[in-house]
Image (tube, rainbow, N blue to C red):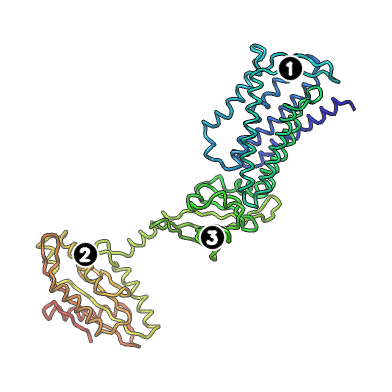
């Protein structure tokens, strides 16, 4: 087999492999990294096929035509390799429209100057056919735009190498293999470019399409094989389209493989430096993720996270992740922010249980809590007491001062009562100006003391409402059950009401115990 045939087989094979990997990348979610790799594979294929057809040409015009085709791929290769390095190493701040224009302005100049070389001869000064070679080959003298492209390629490869070297040094052990693969791919490109520039290759044969094509599968290994091929693309295809929830992806060893930007907002401490670390043991005891996942969580659970003085609620969903062969390869953890729903539920519960005016329990919730407390008392065998308090002649206050000021009186009254009772006591508005206090583990005699303390505090200290002083008195009926004597709430209330009636009949401003 003649030498040209061998070269053509190598070039067309290189082009086919590069094109195949470019098309194959469509099986994965189109991240910026995947997009640049996809274009790189296509550009290398154009380069390899174009050079192959150039070598099959026998006329200068055909060679120049295929040379122009090649530069559709050649011109963008340095920029694509650099962008792959930027994306791969997580230099998000570099990925701006301005930087993109800077990176690809020289490739654009290279492409335009090559395509229009017939008019200015600044890319190739002269072109001819080398007849001394075993088969016709294009021979040319390099012009300034050609040298500009060479200089730019050197700079791009230098920056790419530095980025990958830094990444290899700093990367977690879990990702170091794939980072080394990316570095090896860059070195392969370096070898081809340096040989082409400084080594006297017979007949000026261009080995770059072969070496660039050799770097494409190595790039594919670095991008796909070690984690992205087995785990991250599957995870991203399944769930990363919906970015409103925080997402963590772990492998079988509980190492962090991926996370989205929403997750970073939930856990500001998480970073790409955590990728590859065991999330349960290597993030430190103070890390919020570690705190949550180290606890016993169910596949569907709710967790709360403190953000300063603010409490955030999340629905935590833990699901197994399977590949196309239905083999478990990791875990997806989704944090769905349910703070709005939770806060709404709290407000609704408060509206359903709290008296809007006095901010204490309303009648319905008061009765419900009282019945629960009475049931507890029955089980414990201890005593319980009830106080039924009525504001004396409160209608006169409303008629004389108005309902607006009357409402303020009720608010001040409830504040005074709250200061006089325990946290375990149940205090609620039964209706109008009547209030009920349930006092667990309290005898009627002790309840009487509390009622008197409240009465005297109200009686001796006029309520100050704005610039007005309102003299108010209260009457209270007290009833309590001794140990092993239990009654339902309505019965307790009925006895307390009878005591209250006696207090009113006796002249108000007093406390009566119902025997």
Q: Position of residue 100 (x, y in %)?
A: 55, 31
Residue 203 against residue 462 in the figure, above or below? above
| Camera-nearest residue between 293 and 416 | 293
Instruction: Tell me the element at label 1.
Output: strand
Q: Which mark is residue 411?
A: 2
* Label 1 Cα neighbours within 10 Å, binned few <14 / some 14-19 / many ≥20: some
Q: Residue at x 54, y 32 (%)?
A: 99
The numbered mark, 2 or 3, whose residue comes first in the sequence reads 3
Q: Which quadrant would the C terminus be assigned to in this image?
A: bottom left
| Camera-nearest residue between 467 and 258 | 258
Q: Is residue 165 left or right of residue 128?
A: left
Q: Position of residue 165 (x, y in %)?
A: 64, 42
Q: Position of residue 194 (x, y in %)?
A: 72, 30
Q: Which residue is mark 1?
A: 140
Q: Residue at x 64, y 26 (%)?
A: 151
Q: Which residue is mark 3?
A: 284
Instruction: Tell me the element at label 3.
Output: loop
Instruction: Report the residue that reaches farthest toward the right.
Output: 1
Q: Disc 2 and disc 3: Cα gap in Å?
A: 49 Å
The answer to which image quadrant residue 308 occupies is bottom left
Q: Is residue 485 left or right of residue 203?
A: left
Q: Is residue 448 left or right of residue 289?
A: left
Q: Disc 2 and disc 1: Cα gap in Å?
A: 96 Å
The numbered mark, 3 or 1, whose residue comes first in the sequence reads 1
Residue 334 against residue 41 in the figure, above or below? below
* Label 3 Cα neighbours within 10 Å, binned few <14 / some 14-19 / many ≥20: few
Q: Is residue 81 left or right of residue 409?
A: right
Residue 279 against residue 229 in the figure, above or below? below
Using the rendered image of the protein, determine whether residue 35 is visible from the camera's viewpoint. no
Q: Which mark is residue 446?
A: none
């Amino acid at each position: 087999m003649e030498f040209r045939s061998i070269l053509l087989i190598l070039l067309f094979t290189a082009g086919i492999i590069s094109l195949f990997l470019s098309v194959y990348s469509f099986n994965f979610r189109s991240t910026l990294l995947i997009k640049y790799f996809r274009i790189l594979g296509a550009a290398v294929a154009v380069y390899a096929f174009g050079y192959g057809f150039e070598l099959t040409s026998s006329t200068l015009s055909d060679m120049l035509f295929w040379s122009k085709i090649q530069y559709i791929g050649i011109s963008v290769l340095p920029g694509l390799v650099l962008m792959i390095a930027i994306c791969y190493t997580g230099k998000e701040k570099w990925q701006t429209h301005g930087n993109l224009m800077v990176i690809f302005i020289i490739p654009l100049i290279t492409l335009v100057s090559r395509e229009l070389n017939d008019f200015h001869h600044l890319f190739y000064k002269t072109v001819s056919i080398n007849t001394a070679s075993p088969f016709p080959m294009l021979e040319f003298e390099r012009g300034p735009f050609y040298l500009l492209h060479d200089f730019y390629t050197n700079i791009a490869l230098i920056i790419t190498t530095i980025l990958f070297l830094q990444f290899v040094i700093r990367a977690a052990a879990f990702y170091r293999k794939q980072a080394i693969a990316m570095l090896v791919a860059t070195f392969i490109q370096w070898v081809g470019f340096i040989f082409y520039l400084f080594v006297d290759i017979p007949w000026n044969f261009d080995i770059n399409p072969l070496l660039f094509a050799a770097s494409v599968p190595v790039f594919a290994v670095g991008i796909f094989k070690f984690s992205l091929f087995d785990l991250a693309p599957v995870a991203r295809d399944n769930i990363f389209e919906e970015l409103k929830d925080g997402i963590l992806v772990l492998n079988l060893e509980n190492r962090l493989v991926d996370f989205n930007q929403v997750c970073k907002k939930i856990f500001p401490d998480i970073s790409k430096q955590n990728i590859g670390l065991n999330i349960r043991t290597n993030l430190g005891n103070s890390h919020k993720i570690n705190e949550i996942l180290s606890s016993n969580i169910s596949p569907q659970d709710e967790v709360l996270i403190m953000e300063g003085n603010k409490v955030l609620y999340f629905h935590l969903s833990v699901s197994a992740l399977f590949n196309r062969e239905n083999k478990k390869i990791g875990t997806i953890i989704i944090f769905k922010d349910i703070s709005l729903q939770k806060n709404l539920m709290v407000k609704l519960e408060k509206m359903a249980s709290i008296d809007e005016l006095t901010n204490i329990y309303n009648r319905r919730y008061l009765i419900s809590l009282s019945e629960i407390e009475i049931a507890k008392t029955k089980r414990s065998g201890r005593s319980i007491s009830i106080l039924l308090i009525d504001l004396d002649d409160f209608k006169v206050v409303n008629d004389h001062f108005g309902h607006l000021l009357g409402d303020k009186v009720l608010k001040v009254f409830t504040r005074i009562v709250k200061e006089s009772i325990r946290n375990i006591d149940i205090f609620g508005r039964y209706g109008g100006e009547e209030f009920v206090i349930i006092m667990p583990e309290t005898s009627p005699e002790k309840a009487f003391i509390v009622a008197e303390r409240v009465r005297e505090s109200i009686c001796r200290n006029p309520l100050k409402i704005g610039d007005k002083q309102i003299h108010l008195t209260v009457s209270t009926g007290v009833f309590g059950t001794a140990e092993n004597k239990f009654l339902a709430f309505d019965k307790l209330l009925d006895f307390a009401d009878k005591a209250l009636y006696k207090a009113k009949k006796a002249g108000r401003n007093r406390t009566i115990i119902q025997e």
